[in-house]
Amino acid sequence: MLTITHGTAHGPGYSGAGGIGGQTTLPAGKKFADDFHLFAVEWDEGRLRWSVDNVPYFSMTPTNLPAGAKWVFNQP
């Protein structure tokens, strides 16, 4: 059963297996399939933030990128 969820961003220089992300688990060994959950990604020009049930678990800014990689999340 699914106990972990991942949030990953992909762009030039950090795509495929090189994506940048984080993961979270539910408290007390609960499984995601046991109930309804709200999965979200908040996006603005300088940050991406992943959350489950309104609890943030990973945030990414241009400073997280590998050297020379482009931040492509600052456009509509």
Image (cartoon, grey):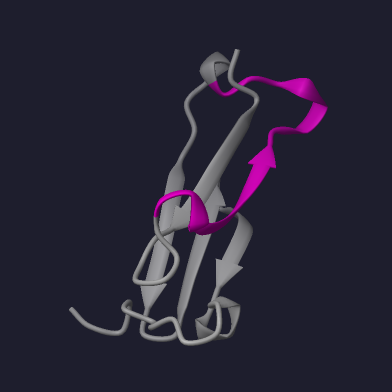
Give the residue furthest to the right. 28
Q: Position of residue 23 (x, y in %)?
A: 63, 46
Q: Position of residue 69 (x, y in %)?
A: 44, 81
Q: Residue at x 52, y 17 (%)?
A: 33
Q: Position of residue 37 (x, y in %)?
A: 49, 33
Stretch of the chain drawn in magenta: 16-32
Give the residue furthest to the left. 76
Asked whether residue 18 is drawn in magenta, I would say yes
Relative vertical location of residue 69 with respect to residue 10 in this rendering, above or below:
below
Relative vertical location of residue 63 with respect to residue 31 in this rendering, above or below:
below
Q: Quadrant of the C terminus?
A: bottom left
Q: Residue at x 81, y 26 (%)?
A: 28
Q: Foreground residue, 31 or 1? A: 1
Q: Residue at x 39, y 61 (%)?
A: 10
Asked whether residue 25 is drawn in magenta, I would say yes
Is 63 positioned to the left or the right of 11 in the image?
right
Q: Foreground residue, 27 or 62? A: 62
Is 8 positioned to the left or the right of 25 in the image?
left
Residue 14, by quadrant, is bottom left
Residue 6, by quadrant, is top right
Count of marks overlaid on the render: 0
Residue 9, by quadrant, is bottom left
Q: Quadrant of the N terminus?
A: top right
Relative vertical location of residue 70 with respect to residue 3 in this rendering, above or below:
below
Is 13 positioned to the left or the right of 27 in the image?
left
Q: Position of residue 75 (x, y in %)?
A: 22, 83
Relative vertical location of residue 31 with respect to residue 76 in this rendering, above or below:
above
Q: Residue at x 65, y 24 (%)?
A: 3
